[in-house]
Image (cartoon, grey):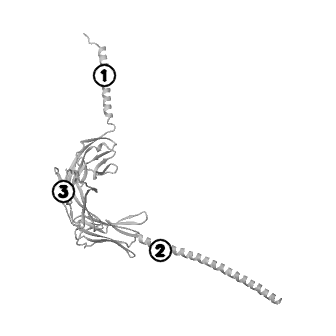
C-alpha cells in the first residue's frame, strides 16, 4: 500500500509538475508572442520613421535643386548662326534670390576686342514666390571671332550653376534681290557652308512650303524662280536644309526679296458725325515693312489715350489710325507716310476727314422755317398795307 500510495503520489506529483511545466511553457509562448508582436510593432514604427526621414531628405534635396535652374534661349546645345547676322542670347534664371547671387555671361572671346551688348537684369516675381531673372547678350554682327561656347553662370557662396550653348558661324552665299515695277521674274538661291552632310529639302515663305506651279519653279540645283511678279511677292524666303550630323536637324537659309515702300490710294474723303469713331486704314506695301507715321494737316500725329490710337494692319505696325469720340476740331487732312530705312525712300497718301454736327440736319430745316415765317410776315404786311390803301382812295 505504501508503495502504491508512493507510486500514486509520484504519479500525482509528476502530473502536477507536468501541468506546471505546461503552464510555464504556455506563458513563455504567450510572452514570446507578445514580445514578438511588440517587436514587430516597434520595427514597423521604426521603418515608418526612417521612411519619413528619407522622404523628407528627398524633398529637401529636391527643393534645394529646384531652388535654382538656369537655361539659355535659343534652347539648343549647338547653334548655327549666319555670318554677319545679329544674334541675341537670353539667360533665364529661376530661383529664390539671395543677396550673394551673381549672374555672369562667359564669352568665347575677349570682350575688349570684340563688341557686344549686355542688357541689365530683368526680374519678375512668379506666383510661387520664386523669381525669374533674364539677362540678354546681343551680338550685332556675328563673325568667326564670336564662335565658340557661350555660358551663363549664377554663383554665390553656397551654390553654382551653369548653362551653355556652342555656337558655330555659317557662311551664306545669296543674291541681293530687289523688286522693281516691270520685273517679270526673279531667281533666288542660297549656298551655305554646312558640309557634305547637308541636303537641300524645300523652299518656304511665311513658314509655308512653296509648291511648284504657275507662281514658282523649282530647279535641280536648289534655286527658286518666282514668276509673274508683283510687289506682294516681296518678303523673306527660306531654303531649308536637312542636317544629318547636327543636333538641330535642319538649317534655314533666309533670302530676302526686297521692295521699296508704296502706299495704295485712299478714298478722297470720309464723312462722320460728332461722337462717332473712325478707322482709317493704310494699305502699305514693301519689304522690309516700312515705318508708318500719321500726320494731320502736315503735323505729326501723336497717340492720345482714349482718343487717338495706332494699331497694326496687314502685319504693318501703326498702319491703322483710330479716332474716338469725334469732335468738329478733328476734321482735317490725314496723311499716311511710309518710310523705308532699307531704301531711304518715302511714299504717302492722304484722306480728308469731315466731321458733321449732330444737329446739322436741323439747321436747313430751321432756315426753311425762318424763310416761311419771313414770307408770311411779308404777305401779312402787304395785305395790311393794301387794305389801308384801299380805304383812302385817290381824289380825282
Image-quadrant location for residue 363: top left
- Apparent side of residue 245 relative to residue 186 in the rendered image (left or right): right
- Apparent side of residue 143 relative to residue 36 in the rendered image (left or right): left
Rendering coords of residue 385 (x, y %): 30, 19
Q: Which residue is drawn at 41% across and 71% down?
A: 65
Image-quadrant location for residue 353: top left
Q: Which of disc 1 and disc 3 is earlier in sequence?
A: 3
Q: Nearer the viewer, residue 179 or 330?
A: 179
Classify 141 as above or below 329: below
Q: Residue at x 76, y 85 (%)?
A: 11
Rendering coords of residue 23 (x, y %): 70, 81
Residue 321: tell me if it is visible: yes
- Apparent side of residue 18 relative to residue 77 in the rendered image (left or right): right
Q: Which of 271 and 17 is in front in this view?
A: 17
Label 3 crowd (10 A; few <14 / some 14-19 / many >=20): some
Q: Residue 187 carries which label?
A: 3
Q: Regarding mark 2 in the picture, which secondary structure is present there?
A: helix
- Label 3–label 1 contact, CB within 8 A: no
Rendering coords of residue 101 (x, y %): 37, 72
Amino acid at each position: 500500500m505504501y508503495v502504491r500510495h508512493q507510486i500514486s503520489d509520484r504519479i500525482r506529483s509528476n502530473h502536477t509538475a507536468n501541468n506546471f511545466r505546461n503552464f510555464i511553457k504556455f506563458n513563455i509562448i504567450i510572452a514570446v508572442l507578445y514580445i514578438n508582436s511588440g517587436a514587430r510593432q516597434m520595427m514597423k514604427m521604426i521603418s515608418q520613421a526612417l521612411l519619413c526621414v528619407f522622404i523628407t531628405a528627398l524633398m529637401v534635396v529636391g527643393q534645394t535643386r529646384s531652388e535654382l535652374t538656369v537655361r539659355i534661349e535659343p534652347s539648343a546645345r549647338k547653334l548655327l548662326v549666319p555670318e554677319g547676322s545679329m544674334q541675341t542670347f537670353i539667360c533665364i534664371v529661376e530661383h529664390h534670390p539671395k543677396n550673394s547671387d551673381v549672374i555672369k555671361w562667359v564669352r568665347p572671346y575677349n570682350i575688349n576686342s570684340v563688341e557686344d551688348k549686355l542688357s541689365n537684369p530683368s526680374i519678375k516675381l512668379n506666383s510661387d514666390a520664386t523669381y525669374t531673372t533674364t539677362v540678354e547678350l546681343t551680338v550685332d554682327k556675328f563673325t568667326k571671332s564670336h564662335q565658340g561656347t557661350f555660358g551663363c553662370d549664377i554663383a554665390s557662396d553656397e551654390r553654382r550653376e551653369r548653362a551653355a550653348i556652342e555656337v558655330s558661324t555659317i557662311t551664306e552665299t545669296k543674291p541681293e534681290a530687289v523688286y522693281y515695277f516691270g520685273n517679270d521674274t526673279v531667281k533666288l538661291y542660297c549656298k551655305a557652308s554646312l558640309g557634305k552632310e547637308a541636303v537641300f529639302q524645300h523652299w518656304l515663305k511665311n513658314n509655308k512650303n512653296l509648291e511648284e506651279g504657275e507662281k514658282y519653279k523649282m530647279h535641280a540645283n536648289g534655286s527658286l524662280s518666282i514668276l509673274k511678279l508683283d510687289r506682294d511677292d516681296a518678303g523673306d524666303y527660306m531654303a531649308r536644309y536637312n542636317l544629318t550630323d547636327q543636333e538641330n536637324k535642319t538649317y534655314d537659309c533666309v533670302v530676302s526679296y526686297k521692295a521699296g515702300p508704296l502706299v495704295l490710294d485712299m478714298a478722297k474723303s470720309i464723312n462722320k458725325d460728332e461722337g462717332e469713331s473712325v478707322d482709317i486704314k493704310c494699305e502699305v506695301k514693301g519689304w522690309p515693312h516700312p515705318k508708318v507715321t500719321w500726320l494731320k494737316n502736315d503735323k505729326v500725329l501723336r497717340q492720345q489715350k482714349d482718343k487717338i490710337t495706332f494699331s497694326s494692319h496687314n502685319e504693318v505696325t501703326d498702319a491703322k489710325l483710330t479716332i474716338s469720340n469725334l469732335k468738329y476740331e478733328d476734321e482735317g487732312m490725314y496723311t499716311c507716310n511710309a518710310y523705308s530705312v532699307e531704301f531711304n525712300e518715302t511714299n504717302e497718301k492722304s484722306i480728308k476727314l469731315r466731321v458733321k454736327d449732330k444737329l446739322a440736319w436741323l439747321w436747313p430745316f430751321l432756315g426753311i422755317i425762318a424763310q416761311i415765317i419771313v414770307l408770311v410776315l411779308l404777305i401779312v404786311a402787304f395785305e395790311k398795307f393794301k387794305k389801308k390803301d384801299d380805304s383812302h382812295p385817290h381824289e380825282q
